[in-house]
Image (tube, grey):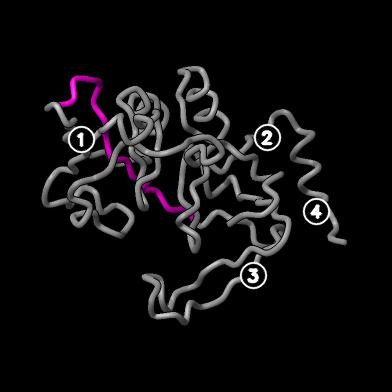
Amino acid sequence: MSQKNPKSSTRRSNPDQRKFYHITFDYLRGGSLGFHMENEGVLPDEVGGLTGMIEPPRFMFKKSLGRMPRDLEIYRRYWLISDRAKLVFESIDPEGFSFVPCTVRTPRGAWEGSPYWLCDVVRVLDALDESKTRVKSSIRDDRRYEDFGRKVYEFTGETELIFREEVIGNAHIFRMAYYDSRIICDGELKDACKSAGLKGLLFRDVLTLGHFF
């Protein structure tokens, strides 16, 4: 049986400590999607790549296929977000994101609703306290991965993430170095999203994550 890290209990009981969350799209609710990107081939694969796109992302919204996008959906490594989600993100941490406006159409013509954006979290921080987190690291030896030859994290079993706040500083959102598919935010950004009534977001406390894939 694994032992609980005593530092985790201390953080939970201290109301002055910042809380951190794994933020992603709400995969627990959904159904068939009524939208897709028509020029997916132009999407770059690297963090920060949106600024170099050669043409704007083009989306088709088609209600007959399924539900319309919520305020946040995942699209490959990026987020498809609503205009009001963009306003919230920019108000809390404008330097943490990159945005590209989407061209949206429907089977009947141009989309007449609010704008949508592709969003990328561009800040990457090496903030994980490896001495207090159950994590293994290795060098990626599979050439099929873009991080081949670089350090990667491997999480096994029940996971609690402990971050070094001196590295995070004033940032409210960031990707994890060596595991950059995982995005972490703090309670201030979470609360702003909740106050704005944003739909389609899921927040998981990093101290009670369970399995982290």
Tell me which residue sits at (22%, 37%) in the image. 60
Q: Nearer the viewer, residue 135 or 118?
A: 118
- Residue type at the position of mark 1: Pro
Give the numbered dot on residue 5.
4
Whole-Å distance between the Cαs marked 3 and 4?
A: 16 Å
Query: At numbered mark 3, what does the secondary structure look like: helix, strand or loop?
Result: strand
Pair 3/1: label in front: 1
Residue sticking out furthest to the right: 1
Q: Nearer the viewer, residue 71 or 6?
A: 71
Query: At numbered mark 2, what does the secondary structure look like: helix, strand or loop?
Result: loop
Local packing at callout 2 (Cα closer than 10 Å; few below 14, some 14-19, many 20+) is few
- Residue type at the position of mark 3: Lys
Local packing at callout 1 (Cα closer than 10 Å; few below 14, some 14-19, many 20+) is some
- Residue type at the position of mark 2: Gln
Q: Which residue is mark 3?
A: 136
Tell me which residue sits at (14%, 26%) in the image. 108
Whole-Å distance between the Cαs marked 2 and 3?
A: 26 Å
Magenta-drawn segment:
110-125
Local packing at callout 4 (Cα closer than 10 Å; few below 14, some 14-19, many 20+) is some
* Residue 50 rendering spot, x and y as whole percentages: 24, 49
Pair 1/4: label in front: 1
Q: Are marks 1 and 4 in contact (CB under 8 Å)?
A: no
Query: At numbered mark 1, what does the secondary structure look like: helix, strand or loop?
Result: strand
Q: Is residue 180 magenta?
A: no
Give the numbered dot on residue 101.
1
Tell me which residue sits at (18%, 50%) in the image. 39
- Residue type at the position of mark 4: Asn
Q: Which residue is mark 2?
A: 17
